Image (cartoon, grey):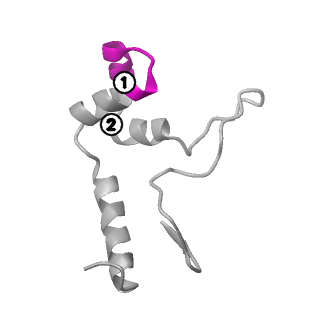
Amino acid sequence: MAITGDFLVATDTRGWTTADKDDGILNDESFEVFLEAVAPGKLAEAEQEVGKSKVRKGLWIAENVPGPSEVSDLYEQIITLLRHRGLGS
């Protein structure tokens, strides 16, 4: 999570690199990369169960994979920041 002036960037991504198939650059900023890091193999399992639809895979993952601690930690950081700024109860 990064705070710059009045702006907050909250992310659990591993970096900011966007994939470039032409140059063979892999990304590290996508949901898929994050999911593979916290729940290895679950994206492939979701595709086997429901097909290639990202919406259906996301729903399957939400229903079958416990929420990663990285997400809970990020939410706690956001809540703490908002409270410090007088925006939370």
Residue under pointer 1: 56
Amino acid type, label 1: Arg
Amino acid type, label 2: Ala
> Around disc 2, counting alpha carbons within 10 Å, would you say few (fewer than 14), some (14 to 19), or many (20 or more)?
some
Highlighted range, magenta: 44-55
Q: Secondary structure at mark 2?
A: loop
Tag 1–tag 2 contact (CB < 8 Å): no
Judge whether residue 3 can be spotted in this image: yes
Q: For the point 37% across and 77% down, which residue is it?
A: 82
Residue under pointer 2: 39
Q: For the point 53% across and 41% down, which residue is it?
A: 30
Tell me which corner region of the image, top left, top right, bottom left or bottom right, holds residue 62. top left
Up the image or down, 14 lies above or below 83; here it is: above
Q: Position of residue 21 (x, y in %)?
A: 71, 27
Does the magenta run of residues contain 45?
yes
Mark number, residue 82? none
Q: Position of residue 14 (x, y in %)?
A: 51, 50
Q: For the point 40% across and 84% down, which residue is it?
A: 85
Q: Position of residue 5 (x, y in %)?
A: 59, 80
Q: Secondary structure at mark 1?
A: helix
Judge whether residue 41 can be spotted in this image: no
Q: Disc 1 and disc 2: Cα gap in Å?
A: 17 Å
Q: For the point 34% across and 22% down, which residue is it?
A: 46
> Around disc 1, counting alpha carbons within 10 Å, would you say few (fewer than 14), some (14 to 19), or many (20 or more)?
some
Q: Position of residue 13 (x, y in %)?
A: 49, 50
> What secondary structure is the stretch in magenta mostly built from?
helix
Tell me which corner region of the image, top left, top right, bottom left or bottom right, holds residue 59. top left
